[in-house]
Image (cartoon, rainbow, N blue to C red):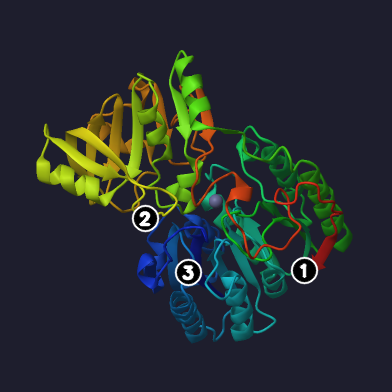
Amino acid sequence: MARILIGTFFQETNDFHPNDTVYEDFGILHGEAMLEDRTGVVAGAVDILTSREGVEIVPTYSAAMGAGGTITQACFERTTSELLHAIDRQKTGADGVYLNLHGAMASERDKDPEGYVLQEVRRIVGPDVPVVASFDMHGTITRRMLTHMDGCSILHTYPHIDWYETGARAAGVLLRILDGARPVIGTVYTPTMVRGDELKTATGVHGTFIRYLERLEERDDVLAGGIMLGHPPTDCPEQGSRVVVITDGDRDLAAREALHIGQSFWNMRSHMQCVLHTVEEGIRIAENAGGTVVFADAADATSSGAPGTGNTILKGFLESDYRGSVLFPIRDDLAVERAMEAGVGQTISVPLGGTRDPRFTPVEITATVEVLGRRDDTPIAVLKCRNITIFAAASGPLLCDRWMYPAFGQDPKDFDVVVKKLPHTPDEWYDDWAERTITIDSPGAASPNIPTLGHRFVARPIYPLDPDMTFTPEVEVYE
Ligand SMILES: [Zn+2]
């Protein structure tokens, strides 16, 4: 019988978010409740582990959420101590540990929370129990993490569609180690912060690296491979990108392949940056377009941890003489509240946007309330201001979803311009039918204009903050 402990510690920190992440922002699960989700990364791991006869799964503790601001010290201490106590209680007779981690967490004082967790889990279970983790690709695998884990898997796809498979790959690595494989991690760090369309796996440069890694993973002597792209909005010392190739005992192979991919990654750094347009340029493009133009407000992407209250693009349209129809989503509690008080068909005047991010100042609008309702308990008001349909949602997890519109009578295909507060989305959301998608250079906590974010803790030099820097990739091996 192999007894495998499972834990989750998952959040994507955006240190440029104006609000901190506190304990109450996390969803906390204990024990068996961790196994109820059947599609995510833990489900993928559990399905592979339990397909093996004689494996006992021991779910311990899960603290998980999407993106948010810097984790307060109190939140860091409480979540990590709850996780580590849960693992400590189950450590007797443990044969392996699988941890579902993000990789982009940062707290007020510890800029490497996952490294701390791996270090402490190693201390609890001892040197002989294999510890394997899975990661989102948008994060940092630090040297502390590499020192205290035996293997890992990293998402292969962006936009992310292989959560389940990534959990399955991590479990596969763990089973291989339990069967006697001797993991050797070859890894290359590059001082790069990357963004933009070339990171889309299906069509961009990123995909060429991933397809190469997937061919490597087909080899019997390779346990896993992946690339941590880094997450520029996390302001941490080891920010950058990292290639990982894990072999079964073959130090030369791990080192050679990691260096090969790491060198290619470094060579392609200038391609993996975002092409940006000003709002005015975007409006001119829309004026001359024959179909819908999608404006990506990546800087205010709620999926990247920005508040979603940015109004730069809205202001740009209000100040222009553009007359096409515009669909503009925003988070704004006051506007939704005022619309609810007034009722459908009424006209309201309200300051809109900028409520949770001092980068923006509210813009005064007068609008007609067109539709009111709720989605997933979040109050929503659809407002019409001149040629602009404003989809205002109260604070909550929304805005990340193209499918929120139909229930409120809105079809993005009916608009000349659709603003999305997301960097990239699955093709069927917009790209399959829209004429063009452009990324707007608006301010925001998740701006793809990386030098504007204002990093304080990342090690220098790093590209693109230091665009002329020189660097020679070097391989590190952990075994
Ligand atoms: Zn990600």
The N terminus sits in image quarter: bottom right
Q: In the drawing, what numbered circle is on residue 474?
A: none
With respect to residue 119, does 335 lie above or below? above
The C terminus sits in image quarter: bottom right
- The residue positioned 48% from the left and 86% from the top of the image is 89
On the image, the x and y values in percent for residue 184 come to: 79, 65
Q: In the drawing, what numbered circle is on residue 356?
A: 2
Label 2 lies in ligand 1 vicinity (Cβ under 8 Å): no
Q: In the drawing, what numbered circle is on residue 182?
A: 1
Name the element at disc 1: loop
Residue type, mark 3 in image: Ile
- The residue positioned 28% from the left and 45% from the top of the image is 393
Instruction: Please tell me how crowded label 2 is: few (under 14), some (14-19), or many (20+) other residues with Cα within 10 Å.
Output: some
Specify the quadrant of the image occupied by residue 429: top left
On the image, the x and y values in percent for residue 76 come to: 48, 75
Q: Are marks 3 and 2 in contact (CB under 8 Å)?
A: no
Point out the frontmost of discs 3 and 2.
Answer: 2
Residue type, mark 1 in image: Arg
The residue wearing badge 3 is 71
Specify the quadrant of the image occupied by residue 373: top left
